[in-house]
Image: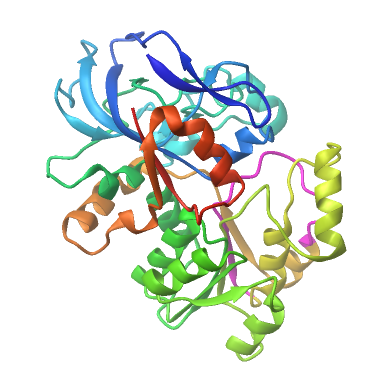
Amino acid sequence: MEALTWHGERDVRVDDVPRPELVNETDAIIEITATAICGSDLHLYNDRMPGMREGDILGHEPMGEVVQVGDDVETLEVGDRVVVPFTISCGSCWFCENDLYSLCDNSNPNAEIARKTMGQSPAGLFGYSHVLGGYAGGQAEYLRVPYADVGPVKVDSDLPDEQVLFLSDVFPTGYMAAENADIGEDDTVAVWGCGAVGQFAVQSARMLGADQVVAIDRFPERLSMAREHGDAITINYEHEDVYDRLMELTGDRGPDSCIDAVGTEAHGTGLTALSDRIKQEVRLEDDRPIALREAIKCCRKGGTVSVPGVYVGRVDNLPFGAVMNKALTVKSGQTHVQRYLDPLLERIEDGDVDPSFVLTHEADLADGPELYETFNDKEDDCVKVILRP
C-alpha cells in the first residue's frame, strides 16, 4: 500500500509499505477514505520531536471503513464507517476508567522511553514517534487500530467525510482547550494561534458561553476565518502590541482565560523570539514558548491558562513567578478524544457546527509531500489539508 513516510527533516515521501495485519484480537483494520495533515505533524516534519525513525508512517487524523476485525472486537463490524481518534487507549486502566484517555497506562509499548524524560508515560499515539509507541500512522491506504472497541466512533449518517473527519483530533482538541479554560458567561477568552485547533478553540469558547473571544495570529486569512466563523475580535501581533490591545479590551484587567493553541514552534517579534529560534536550532532548548509566555503575562489575576499546543521538552525563560504571584491556573494535555466523540458528533449531526469550515486544501495522498511543504511554509492560504488515498 502507499503511505506518507518520514525520512528526516522536511523529507516526507510516498512509499510502498506492507499493508497492516491484525496483531491482537482486539484490533481492527481500517481502509482509509480521508486523512488530514495536522499542525502538530509539522513538528515531526521539522524534526522537533525525538524518537522518529526513517520510514515511520505519519498521520493521526484518519477515518474510513472497517475491513477486518479481531475475534474479540465487539462494537465494530466489517463495513462500519468510523472516525479514529489520535489517542490509543485501552479502556480498562485507571486513567481510561476516569475518562483520561490520553494518559492510558497500557497503550504505549515504549513507556520506559517516555518515563525517562517525563516521569510517567502518556498514551500511545498514531504516527507520532517511538517515544509515544511507534505506531504506524493514518496517512496511508490502511491502518491497524488497536483496542478497536475503545477508539473509533461510528458514523451512521450520510454526512461527508470533511464534516466528521476532524473529530479525530482538532475539533475535540479545541473543545477540550476551551473546557479547560473554565469559561464563564461574561468572560473574555484570548486564543493564541488561528490554525485549525485555534479555530475550534474560538468556536468552542463561544459554545461554552464566552462573551468576548479574541484571536491572535499573523496571517490575515486565518484571522479572517476566526472573525467570520467565530465572531472573534482579532489581533495581528505583527501590527499591534498584544498585551496593550488585550488590556484595552478588558478594562486593563486582562482576559479571564488564555489559550495557547500554538506550542513548540511559535513565532514572535523582538529579541526574545530571535533568541528562542537560535537556542532551538542549536538544541539549547526544545520548544519556543513565545505564545505561552505572552498568555501568562496577559492573563488576568486568578485566571486560567489552557495549553492544547504541543510541547516536546524543555522551555527557557518561562515566567513561572507570574504564574505563582498572579495565582494562575494552568491546564494542559493531549486530548482525551474518546470523551468528546459522541457529544461533538451529535452537535455536528444537529447542525450546531460544521467543522469543514477549516478545510482549505484537498488532494490525493500522493500529493502529500508537496502539501506538507505548502502547509509548513503557510503558502496558498493553507489552514487545513485533507488527503484521500
Left or right, 56 with reference to 16:
right
Residue 366 % position (x, y): 42, 27
Left or right, 127 with reference to 266:
left
In terms of image quadrants, where is residue 296?
Answer: bottom right
Quadrant of the rendering where the N terminus is positioned:
top left
Seen at 54% across and 23% down, the residue is 13
Question: What segment is highlighted magenta in the picture?
Answer: 302-320
Seen at 54% across and 38% down, the residue is 372
Residue 44 % position (x, y): 61, 33
Residue 307 included in the magenta stretch of the image: yes
Q: Nearer the viewer, residue 355 or 174?
A: 355
> Is any part of residue 228 visible from this angle?
yes
Quadrant of the rendering where the C terminus is positioned:
top left
Residue 366 included in the magenta stretch of the image: no
Seen at 54% across and 45% down, the residue is 375
Q: How is the image coloured?
A: rainbow
Please tell me whether residue 239 is drawn above or below residue 381 in the rendered image. Answer: below
Left or right, 242 with reference to 373:
right
Q: Nearer the viewer, residue 270 or 365?
A: 365
Residue 318 % position (x, y): 78, 57
Q: How many marks?
A: 0
Task: Tell which residue pokes out farthest to the bottom in this image.
Answer: 251
> Is any part of residue 99 visible from this angle?
no
Residue 195 % position (x, y): 51, 56
Please tell me whether residue 79 is drawn above or below residue 209 in the rendered image. Answer: above
Q: Nearer the viewer, residue 255 or 141?
A: 141
Seen at 76% across and 40% down, the residue is 286
